[in-house]
Amino acid sequence: MAKGLKFVNYLGYGIADLGNNIAFAAVGSYLTLFYSDVLGAHFDENTSAAWLSAVTAIMIIARVWDAINDPIMGWLAQRAKPTKWGKFRHYLLFGGIPLAFSAVLMFLPIPDMSLAECIVFALITYIAYGMIYTVVLVPYGSLATVMTRDVRERSRLSIARSIGGGIGGIPAGMLFPLLVYSTVIDANGEKVSELDGDKLVICMAAIAFVMIISYVTAFFTTKENYEYPHTAQDTDLFATLKSLARNKPFVIMSLAGMLLIASSMYITSIDLYLFNVYYRREGMMTFVTIATYAPMVATIPFTEAIIRKVGKKEMCLYGLTASVAATLVMAVWRIPNPWIFIALCFLQGAGVGFFTLEIWALAMDVIDYQELRTGKREEATGYAAFTFMRKIGQAIAAIVPALLGAVGYVASKGYAGQSSETVDGIYILATAVPLVMFVLMFILMLMYPLNKKRDAEMRLALAERRAAYDSANTVPEDDTAPAVEN
């Protein structure tokens, strides 16, 4: 019998991603800035360039290593015997609480460290955070596949996750710009704003508290309704990955998901420098965040109806068309007014918002397609491979410090002291790179084969296969057993 989800289940699943993303957004937005403007504030011009190059190398190494961990974690979670809480749900507690503490540790503003000490500190704390994040994220994504088999409920879970993740992004996007800067007097006697490491670590401690509350709440409000007994057999990690590599929808969606997270993290990180250095209006990042996420929030009530009408692939294509158009205008026109730039951020966010809302439902779709191809339900390994590509996307976004070094950014000069070439270079970095990413996403979605018609055909074939399996493995009732008196 189908086990329908209740509102509290959607709420709990969404709250878990609030816990994930409240730290993820802060790390994605402010860790690079923390490295460059707090840890690297006392470096001279030559050492600053070396430090920014080291930061890029650290982030790429950590994220590639983190990506490698994803399939391993998925394989381990797939093979692990279920506990009394289920197969995936308990990771919310056992991984989530250590994750909260590691998120704070990365932002400790230790003063006057040497270049070598900064490198060691950043490498150890960042890798630790990434590995613990994997312990939470991979089982959490797989949790949705054992909560429901219904395609509409899965779409609602994806939307709930996107809502939770969107709310989790509010502190870093809207509150941090108002809380983590301090006014100081520069060398010319003028009042300027700069990132305050002490304020930043206090805000991260508050975020850690919210993370713990979120994971505990999610643990008690989610439930695993299906065991998928036909996947209880041992799984071969490398054979599964080889099979996934031949799954065209999976490959395309993994690449698109990689670019989606890369563009999101890159834009969030580089826009801080754009508004700090180019527009000299660091407080306006709050409005950038509102403009980016408000259209996505506004479309949530209509998303399910749009999907039924046009399909997931088609909805994402229409949205990406708007994002490409808005970003093209940003890149071609050197926009002098920050409010005009923010207005285009609204259009950009409205377009990619459809893709963001449905990315996890699409991930489950391509894992379903893998089951149809192979007859095996290996959701944890498949999901881990999908998140592996997203981690590669994070590694791509980590190129920001190196690009800043390439255009001559030096933290010790302050926001007002950068050269005109650096200021112009930051604008180009903030517009041209996202444009390339959005165009590539659009092309990939054109190639994605699971349109509305083929997706419906897949659902029907899977339902028939699962019904046949359930029928063949149902233990018949013993008609000779004595009746039980009431």
Image (tube, rainbow, N blue to C red):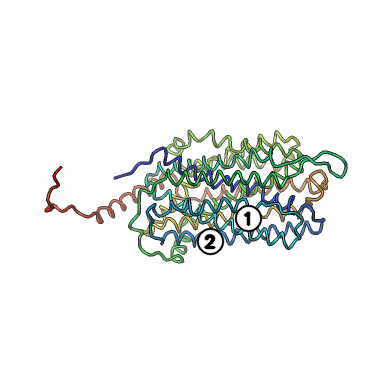
447 is higher (above) or lower (below) than 310: below
Label 2 vs 1, first from the N-terminus:
2
In the figure, is residue 387 to the left or right of 203? left
Q: Quadrant of the N terminus?
A: top left
Bin the neighbour count of mark 2 within 10 Å (Cα to Cα): few under 14, some 14-19, many 20 and up.
many
Please name the residue shown 74% across and 50% down the image. Answer: 37
Name the kind of residue labelled 2 in the image: Asn
In front: 119, or 430?
A: 119
Screen quadrant of the C terminus:
top left
Q: Where is residue 353 in the image (x, y as percent from the top left)?
A: 55, 40
Residue 99: where, in percent of width, then height? 55, 53
Task: Name the residue type under label 1.
Answer: Ile
Q: In the rendered view, would you say 330 is above or below 98?
A: above
The residue indicated by pointer 2 is 69
Helix, strand or loop at label 1? It is helix
Q: Nearer the viewer, residue 461 or 2?
A: 2
Which labelled disc corresponds to residue 396?
Answer: 1
Viewer-side label of 2, 1 = 2
In the rendering, which numbered label is found on residue 377? none
The residue positioned farthest toward the right in the image shown? 188
- Whole-percent x and y of residue 317? 53, 43
State the separation of the CA atoms marked 2 and 1: 17 Å
Q: Are the two marked residues, 2 and 1, in contact with CB atoms closer than 8 angstroms?
A: no
Residue nearer the viewer, 465 or 58: 58
Q: Left or right of 300: which side holds 202?
A: right
Q: Residue at x 68, y 59 (%)?
A: 121
Specify few, some or many for label 1: CA neighbours under 10 Å numbering under 14, 14-19, or 20 or more: many
Q: Is 21 on the left or on the right of 378, as rendered? A: right
How far across and down, in percent of the image, does residue 426 sit?
A: 74, 47
